[in-house]
Image: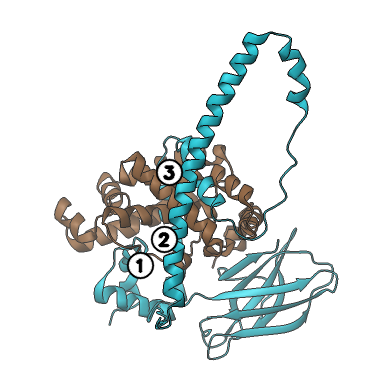
Amino acid sequence: MEPIEDSPIRRGDAGDEMRLVARIRAGDQQAMSELYDRYSKVVYAVALRVLQDAAAAEDVLQDIFLQLWRNPDAFDASRGSLSAWLAVISRHRCIDRLRKRRPETDIEECVITGGPDLRDETERALVIEKVRGVLAEMNPDQRKVLELAFFQGLTHTEIADRTGEPLGTVKTRIRSGLQLLRTKFAG
Amino acid sequence: MKTHEQFADDLALYALGELSGSDRQQLEEHLQSCAACRRELQALRGDMALLGLSSGGPQPPARSKERLMRAVAAEPRGVSAPQPPPRRGFWAALIPAFAALGLLLVALVLWRHNAALKDEVAELGNRNQDQTAQLERMNQELRLLTAPDAVHVSLNPQKAPRQPSGTAIYSPSQKRMMFMASNLAAPPTGKAYELWIIPANGAPVPAGVFKPDEHGYAVMMDHKMPEGVEAKAFAITLENEEGSDKPTSPILLMGTGE
């Protein structure tokens, strides 16, 4: 049972994001500029953390926003908050790049529930601070596994090789680590 | 074959894009029939977004936005929103005052203007080069598309889970609405989907109970809107088939009107 108050409906700027995406769909270049101003820092931060290379991170930033301009229908508000969606897409694109493989995730299939909702810089700073707090309290081994899986794009087999932990433990650490973020963030 | 519980760890690997081979195939098959796992997958992506946002960092360089907006301008699409009229007259009105400062200042202004024009010419040259290359690529693509022997083959995912979706159309003035949905999983025995109108203020209002057909489609045609309710959003939950006065399960689909 999940009370409706905890649902994504609570997201305050869903309508605002939809209007912005609708303007982009209509070919409004100014809307694209506004979208970039609002969300480029999120995409760039993830890309820089994963790729550790400013020029490569800039390329991913360009690709993602240009792709959204070419195909704004890839995102609609029913897929979750735009900031959450962009953070996940940015991570996937960077890992694809690190592994020199074709994009594995179809952005149109990437439906998200929950995740943060960043309306402005203040909100973003609060979310970063809170997530870092949760990570700091996490068991260091679990945090390390999440870091290797999410930011370095290592497979669970590679992580098991590196940490010496059994495969099953690594898999469970990844899942329970992600779920712990959800629980702590909701609380 | 794995049980529902055994897919839990695989879901996280799948969300990370790291599940492959038969594990991936089995999970994708399971996702087609398990709404709970689909919801958990979406929630795990939300968790990943949180993790991603633990990365602070600098603003992207200013040139990055310029580069993007140039690329956007090179691919105009649809009808642009009206641009505000250019401001003019202000500097023109000040020219006599500047002129009074003497020839030296005028020469300086002209010199700087010349430098700016040079930059602009170089910029236009670069842009022209980009557009020529882009035109050539488009020509190549066009030649392929129009070739008499071109064979068109559509590729579609064979096992990918189809995501449920719904569309509500309503008219506040006519107080009527209709609703269509597709790719809905068959509800368990005794259960049905219920449509909710989420008003700007107050609790969700029930707007009809329905079951999808064997293809996952459902339609509620020309449905009367409850009196005095201003819809802010619509949502779908799974309820007992006789309907419920308030949602008792997680939201499966949700959309906000513009």
Give the answer, above or below, for where B123 lies relative to B40: above
What residue did someone put label 3 on?
A44
- According to the image, label 2 marks what residue? B44
Q: Could you tell me which residue is drawn at 43 percent across and 56 percent down?
A: A89
Give the image location of residue A179, x and y in percent: 39, 57
In this view, B1 is above or below B113 = below
| Chain letter of the cyan region | B
The residue that appears at 48% across and 36% down in the rendered structure is: B122
Question: Which picture quadrant has residue A140?
Answer: top left
Disc 1 on helix, strand or loop?
helix
Q: Quadrant of the N terminus of chain B?
A: bottom left
Chain containing mark 2: B
Kindly state the secondary structure of the residue where label 2 is placed: helix
Question: Answer yes or no: do the residues labelled 1 and 3 have beta carbons within 8 Å?
Answer: no
The tag earlier along the polypeptide, 1 or 2, is 1
Tell if the residue under mark 1 belongs to the same chain as the one under mark 3: no
Colour-to-chain, brown: A
Whole-angstrom CA distance, mark 1 to mark 3, is: 27 Å
Distance between the alpha carbons at the discs numbered 3 and 2 = 22 Å
Image location (x, y in percent) of residue A180: 39, 53
Label 2 Cα neighbours within 10 Å, binned few <14 / some 14-19 / many ≥20: many
- The reply to whether callout 1 and callout 2 are in contact (CB within 8 Å) is yes
Location of the C terminus of chain B by quadrant is bottom right
Which one is in front, B76 or A144?
A: B76
Q: Nearer the viewer, residue A179 or B139?
A: B139
Residue type indicated by callout 3: Tyr
Residue designated by label 1: B11
Judge depth for marks 3 and 2 and give the one in front. Answer: 3
Q: Can marks 1 and 2 be said to lie on one chain?
A: yes
Q: How is the image coloured?
A: by chain
User: Which amino acid is tagged 1?
Assistant: Leu
| Chain of the residue that carries numbered disc 1 in the rendered image | B
